[in-house]
Image (cartoon, rainbow, N blue to C red):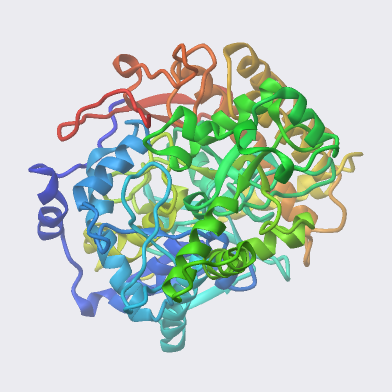
């Protein structure tokens, strides 16, 4: 089946404007008779809920946290992209569009990405008006820094707390609507099924995570903005509660799941420290603006550092391999995440790793501290500063830019990163794959929308740094509020949707059956036992590099693990009342299905592109080798009762405005 992405006709730069002029609108008086459910209250969901309520719709929001302020969006550190060209360095809407398409290795939809670049500037104005404290230059103008995969500075930031500050802005906007009664928040609630009536999404089944009550909620449209599925790997930079359940439930109800194998490995993560670790901590990509990444040139030096016989600061400059600067001179340490991650893995696999496990490289700020220190001394009129003065001033500058990140690193690792280079290694971070949506952000289920990281639409096979916050807020503030009205315009006479309909009855019964079967299983293994096993299969065979043999093994192993889960998992407690293990069990059950589809998707894609690196398809230099003739499409999978029976549908990707060519950052 050919997927209809509903891309408007006309020139690329005019598509969004023309589309907004052509779509149907809902009269303000009719909006107050229409209900919308928003699942997830991070940047995409929070922005959408606030904006839809401001427009006059009646909104219900659902999040499993005790407050929308705890959404995982809060963990985004480095910044948000926007094509404002404040630095005068040649940025433009087209350049942001091009960098994003190229960064995604030519596997994203042209029209969606251009729209994202087009509305990016509005996001900054919106957030400044909300009081988001973006960093500013000496003269008071908003400051920018650069991120991987670009040659300009377009990233707006608030120290290392950008996600937190943006989320507080969206949450404040939500609170205004909660106070007006236009948003009814259901915190500590988890969506466990989608209800479809006459072919349209008309509500959800949710569980109150405090009381254990199963609730029915109806609406004229449902928006899923529940984030990504990186925790299928168990160890990732995601919050421990991040899961795929809402997205997977709508997939099981008919929403196609697109490109699940497109998962991002972030290069600057604090390395794994032991078998009992439950999550990983990200060090912001913004650090690569000033930090230089290196390993020793000689194997014997790497071994001595691993064994504690040699300190990295004792190694002479000529004995260090700044391998990103060596391999990619044009972009240096600011190559895209997939490129930097594979390069780190290659060095560590070759024996040059610098921690006890051999899986770490250095991120060194010594040169930046000296450069900034000398510059600050000169500004202060001190043209012959001592080495101590330079280091003191330089550390002050770095502290102003990245202080909370350095503090976080020292608390976790117990090393002072001002004096000793940080140790970093790649880790699972973001998912470019997700629910398939058309240009309007509607899934293949009428009336069901997906926004932010939950959908697949903007990043192709690899997301550029600082683009997640951009997409989440673009979808929530500036895209969905327009496009959802086009659909809801036909619902102005529908009236309230009754939760007594047989479809609600059937969906609630399905949820109760699954909960009861898990509670009454009386197995011998914990939920985490299965999650960790799944994570090891995913990391070892579907992680930074994949091959046909191991992907086939992964499919078999995940299927067997899922069967064992339902036979032998033990979930203590009851379905009534608070039960964190039951919550985890429901989520891991979904991960065990997603994991198999993930491996199937990776196996079918016989090419390397972005975060999907198949060992059989690489250049002589070890770079990704795409197959544009056979794989320039979105792989959208239809659920058929079992992940192994999923049916592939293709959306061909057509590039009319850019030349598709081999991605190079050299």
Q: Quadrant of residue 318?
A: top right
Q: Considering only vertical position in the picture, is 80 above or below 617?
A: below
Q: Quadrant of residue 79?
A: bottom left
Q: Is residue 488 visible?
A: no
Side of 7 relative to 600 (left or right): left
Q: Residue 8 location in percent, x, y?
A: 15, 44
Q: Residue 220 location in percent, x, y?
A: 36, 62
Q: Quadrant of residue 74?
A: bottom right
Tell me the residue at 59%/35% (across/down): 594
Q: Considering only vertical position in the picture, is 320 above or below 79?
A: above
Q: Nearer the viewer, residue 305 or 193?
A: 305
Q: Residue 207 location in percent, x, y?
A: 64, 62
Tell me the residue at 79%/54% (across/down): 581
Side of 427 relative to 617 (left or right): right
Q: How many marks?
A: 0
Which residue appears farthest toward the left when viewing the image?
10
Which residue appears farthest toward the right when viewing the image?
524
Q: Residue 384 location in percent, x, y?
A: 51, 66
Tell me the residue at 41%/65% (across/down): 219
Q: Considering only vertical position in the picture, is 29 above or below 419?
A: below
Q: Nearer the viewer, residue 658 or 351?
A: 351
């Amino acid at each position: 089946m050919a997927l209809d992405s509903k891309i408007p006709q006309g020139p690329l730069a005019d598509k969004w404007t023309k589309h907004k002029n052509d779509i149907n609108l809902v009269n303000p008086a009719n909006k107050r008779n229409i209900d919308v459910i928003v699942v997830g209250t991070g940047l995409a969901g929070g922005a959408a809920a606030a904006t839809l309520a401001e427009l006059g719709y009646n909104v219900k929001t659902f999040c499993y946290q005790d407050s929308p302020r705890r959404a995982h969006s809060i963990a985004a550190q480095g910044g948000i992209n926007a094509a404002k060209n404040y630095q005068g360095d040649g940025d433009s809407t087209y350049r942001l569009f091009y960098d994003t398409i190229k960064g995604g290795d030519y596997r994203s939809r042209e029209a969606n990405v251009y729209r994202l670049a087009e509305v990016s500037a509005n996001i900054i104005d919106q957030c400044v008006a909300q009081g988001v404290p973006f960093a500013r230059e000496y003269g008071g103008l908003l400051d920018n820094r650069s991120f991987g995969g670009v040659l300009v500075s377009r990233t707006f930031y608030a120290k290392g707390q950008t996600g937190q500050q943006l989320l507080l802005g969206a949450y404040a906007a939500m609170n205004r609507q909660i106070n007006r009664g236009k948003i009814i928040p259901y915190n500590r609630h988890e969506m466990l099924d989608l209800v479809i009536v006459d072919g349209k999404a008309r509500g959800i089944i949710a569980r109150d995570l405090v009381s254990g009550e199963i609730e029915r909620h109806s609406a004229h449209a449902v928006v899923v903005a529940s984030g990504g599925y990186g925790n299928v790997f168990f160890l990732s930079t995601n919050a421990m509660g991040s899961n795929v359940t809402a997205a997977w439930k709508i997939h099981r109800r008919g929403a196609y799941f697109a490109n699940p194998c497109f998962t991002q490995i972030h290069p600057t993560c604090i390395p794994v420290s032991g078998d009992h670790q439950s999550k990983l901590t990200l060090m912001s990509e913004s650090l690569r603006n000033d930090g230089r990444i290196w390993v020793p040139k000689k194997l014997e030096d790497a071994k001595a550092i691993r064994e504690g016989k040699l300190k990295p600061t004792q190694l002479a400059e000529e004995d260090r391999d700044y391998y990103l600067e060596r391999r990619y001179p044009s972009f240096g340490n600011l190559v895209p995440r997939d490129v930097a991650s594979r390069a780190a893995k290659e060095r560590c696999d070759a024996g040059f790793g610098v921690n006890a496990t051999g899986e770490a490289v250095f991120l060194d700020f010594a040169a930046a501290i000296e450069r900034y220190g000398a510059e600050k001394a000169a500004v202060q009129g001190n043209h012959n500063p001592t080495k101590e003065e330079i280091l003191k001033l330089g550390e002050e500058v770095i502290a102003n830019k990245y202080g909370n990140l350095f503090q976080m690193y020292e608390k976790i690792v117990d090393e002072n990163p001002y004096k000793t280079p940080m140790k970093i290694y790649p880790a699972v971070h973001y998912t470019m794959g997700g629910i398939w949506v058309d240009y309007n952000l509607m899934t293949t289920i009428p009336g069901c929308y997906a926004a932010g990281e939950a959908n697949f639409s903007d990043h192709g096979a690899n997301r550029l740094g600082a683009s997640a916050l951009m997409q989440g807020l673009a979808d929530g503030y500036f895209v969905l509020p327009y496009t959802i009205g086009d659909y809801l315009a036909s619902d102005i006479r529908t009236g309230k949707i009754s939760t007594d309909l047989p479809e609600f009855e059937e969906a609630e019964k399905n949820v109760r059956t699954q909960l009861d079967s898990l509670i009454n299983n009386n197995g011998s293994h914990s939920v985490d036992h299965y999650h960790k096993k799944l994570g090891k299969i995913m990391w070892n065979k579907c992680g930074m590099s994949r091959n046909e043999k191991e992907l086939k093994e992964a499919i078999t192993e995940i299927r067997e693990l899922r069967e064992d889960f339902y036979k032998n998992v033990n979930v203590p407690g009851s379905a009534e009342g608070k039960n964190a293990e039951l919550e985890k069990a429901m989520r891991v059950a979904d991960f065990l299905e997603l994991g198999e589809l993930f491996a199937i998707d990776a196996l079918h894609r016989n090419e390397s592109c972005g975060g999907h690196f198949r060992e059989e398809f690489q250049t002589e230099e070890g770079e990704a080798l795409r197959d544009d003739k056979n794989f320039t499409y979105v792989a959208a999978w239809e659920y058929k009762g079992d992940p192994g029976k999923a049916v592939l549908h293709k959306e061909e990707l057509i590039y009319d405005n850019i030349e598709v060519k081999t991605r190079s950052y050299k």
